[in-house]
Image: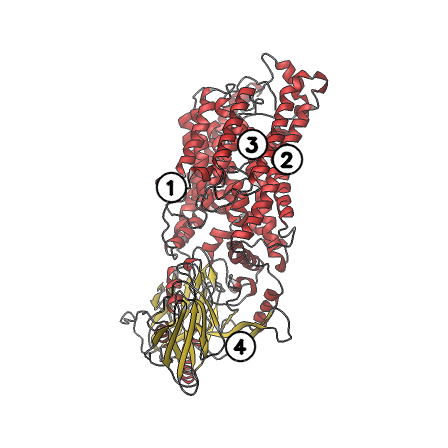
Amino acid sequence: MSATVRPPSGPTAPDGAGGTGPGGARAGRVLAPLRGLAGRSRGSVPLRAALGAGVLSCVVFCLGSLLAGSYPLGSHSRNVVDMGTQYVPFHAYWRKTLLGGTDGDLLMNWNSGFGSNFLGDIGTYLSSPFDLMVVLFPADRVELALYVISTAKITAAGAAMAVLLLRLRRGPWPVAAVLGAGYAVCGWTLDNGAYVPMWLDGLLAFPLLCLVGEWARTGRRPVVGPLVVGLAWVSNFYTAYMATIGAGIVLLVRLLTDEEGRRRLTGVLHAARSVLIGVGLAAPLVLVIYSATKVAHPTPPVTFAPAAWPDVFARLLPATSSTESPALYIGTPALALALTMPFNRRLPARTRYGWPAAICLVALSLHWRPTHLLWHAGAEPNGVTDRQAFVLCGLLLIAAWLSTADGLPRPRALAAGLALLTALALAARGTYAVDRWSYPVFAVALFVGVLAAAAVLVAPRFENRARLLPVLAVALLVTAQAGEMAVAGMRVSRLELQHRSWSPRLGGQERDTAAVVAAKDDWPRSRTDPGADPGRNDQMIVGGQGGGYYSSLTAQITYDTLSALGHGYFAKGRRLVSLDSPVTDAVFSIGTRIRLVQDPAGGAGKVPRATTTAVPPLVTVRPGLRLPDSTARFGASVFANQEMLLGARVYDPPARTTKTRHGKGSLTLSTTCTPGSRAYLSALTFNGTATMNGGRPVAFAGKLPAVRPPVQSIGVVPASGKVRVELRHTGWLDLPKQPIGCLVASRLDQAVQRLRATGATDVRVGGHSVTARIPAGSTGTAVLAVPRIKGWRCAAGDGPARPAKSYLGLIAVPLDGRATSVSCDFRPPGLLRGAAIGATALACLTATAFWYGRTRRRREAPAAAPGV
């Protein structure tokens, strides 16, 4: 940084020289140490900036974890919200898939939801090249692998931003490195991206796509540009979409602030070509995700409610955390430099006003519903509301760089920026997001930053200290920026654990369960369900083929089917949990069920125990079922729904249930059932305990629309046949018309025997296919115990494959008595169409390479002609 400024370079020559004009000689002496650090080779400057930003980003992020005492640099779990229940399990399963240890393949996940579209999940959670690093870690160190992957993405984002800043304008690379790290470890990263690792690909995509815009503006790298776009969209299309919008804004501002005004239309066309070809290259994966999203279970509607402006200003401060306002923290020194831009008269007028105008418009777009939906691809987000905030952080840091690259702004501009910063900080007082650490850390960082600026401003007056003061200024800037961010990371990490739900780290319980599952696994003759506890995509971690499943792409038909049968859920229906019921075990061919029980040896924890029962095969034949003539529909009773799908009456006919209320929070249910039968309770919103005939209380945890408890066994009916259930609950209680069902074991045994007698004699399951031999002369319908998600095609015998039919949500194949086999194959919707678009985009990229190669050779030919 310098107190003087070089003449502005042209818009197409961001590396223009400086140090001329009045005072240039003195400025040159002041900046000599920094220029020495930059090296003589111009190409080494971006490399050093990238390395500096990457190392600083990595150190700051890890230091924040160390100060917070979070794993792997401490004992506290990092499994906040979906990190533990979704992303860790997905990466554990991804590791097994890559190394060949799963039942499915890249298209089908047989372990989750009784069969789910895995390619869609790959594109949503696992398609980043960084995620391949999971294979470098042992199976029991997936959490460590995910931390390293997240840190690597943050490191790369800081390096990419530093390179972008130097591409926008030449300047001291140490300052570019500090600002690049400020982007990588911004508030959005600390509060959002660190716990949603696939979003971090968008953090990296934004500066890369801005570089693509720079190449388009100057007519460079016509082939590399589309490849970068394609890689960004493959890595995580959701945040890449936001980053593409942000990069478009940066390109537009660059073109509009170009003083020479050349090649504006050409730059836009080049950028559009890069984006279209790049997105086309990513189409095979993007269209699969899009198609899966269309048939996914939607979350309940969210009412748009923009954050109040004081809350927005609060998120500019360190150590703030909230899901209801945009995380905009970029470091107090960096923010102060960004706020000097409108007052920095050394900058051209277009630059001085164009960038602040763009930043203000982007900030306003967070508060207007149409633009808010545009940022989020038309879908109102649940949870974190302003997921595009990393773009605004990037724009603020670009403004900080452009206001500083040519030298530190004059004292008046600095004073105006500091005054504006102080006003914003004071406007945030008393808001909910401000932590007790926020203002003290802000004040210290601001003080150290002012000292750094003072060292630069006074350097020309101390000729004998001219070599030391600029270096001291950079050191103070690094201390202020990095130190504040590390403390902010520490505090945000602690706030996450205090105010948001989290899961314990993986440990011995998961290892023991995985061992039991592996010993009992009998797939595909029958399924092994690892159970519902702790209910976080367990089967992805420990194995098995259960109904538990948590994904943003949980299919609507899977949700409809399992919830109608009494399965519980979290996350407003997208996190389905296993149902411990012998009826649904028979329906889905669950021959082995793992339950966690209290350690019989007296230990404090729970240990897995396996129970094996005889169940029908994965493919059963229903002779009396004719499709499409069947009019079977699920009703309100989960017990009747189970009977319909099983094809037999196994519960007692619904008896009259009386309800007696004993004041607030207490209710008694009374009915009669067959002596010796097992009673089950279905309760939609019940949050409390159910005690049958004075026995052991059974806990239910319901809170619609987010959480619904599964049907649970509450006890065995006594010889008297009388059932009396005491409910003690909190909050609203919503019971179905038939809350109690009594299962008669002998009836279930008979139903299972019939299905085994008429079912498939041999079942073979491939990576994404099912083939079964059925008894000769079978008529009616073959029913596969697999949800009929979109993409299944089936055939009976040698007949043609057609889109699979559905019977109460499961795959059904009509039989005419001639077929002795059925076969089904899964192909993710959108894959073929995406492949066609991808092939077209590849052809366009090849044509582009040929055209530009030919043009370059034509230009080089006249220069080579005189030497021939």
Q: Amino acid at mark 3?
A: Ala
**Mark nearer the N terminus (1 vs 4):** 1
The label shown at residue 611 is 4
Check disc 4: other Cα within 10 Å, few if <14, some if 14-19, many if 20+: few
Give the SS element for disc 3. helix
Q: CA distance from mark 1 to mark 3?
A: 28 Å
Query: Which quadrant: the C terminus?
Result: top right
- Closer to the N terminus: mark 1 or mark 2? 2
Q: Can you say whether 502 is above or below 432 in the image?
A: below
Q: Considering only order in the chain, which callout, 4 or 2, is on the residue closer to the N terminus? A: 2
Q: Which residue is mark 2?
A: 52
| 302 over 710 or under it: above or below | above
Question: In the drawing, does residue 75 fall left or right of residue 590?
Answer: right
Ranked by sequence position, the earlier of labels 4 and 3 is 3
Disc 1 target residue: 374
Gap between marks 2 and 4 measured at Cα = 57 Å
Q: Please provide percent x and percent y for residue 338.
A: 52, 29
The quarter of the picture where the N terminus appears is top right
- The furthest residue to the bottom: 719
Seen from the viewer's position, the closer of residues 864 and 576 is 576
Q: Would you name the residue on which mark 3 appears?
A: 334
The secondary structure type at the circle numbered 4 is strand
- CB under 8 Å between discs 1 and 4: no
Q: Amino acid at mark 1?
A: Leu
**Within 10 angstroms of label 2, few (less than 14), some, or many (20 or more) residues?**
many
Amino acid on which the number 2 mark rests in the picture: Gly
Which is closer to the viewer, label 2 or label 3? 3
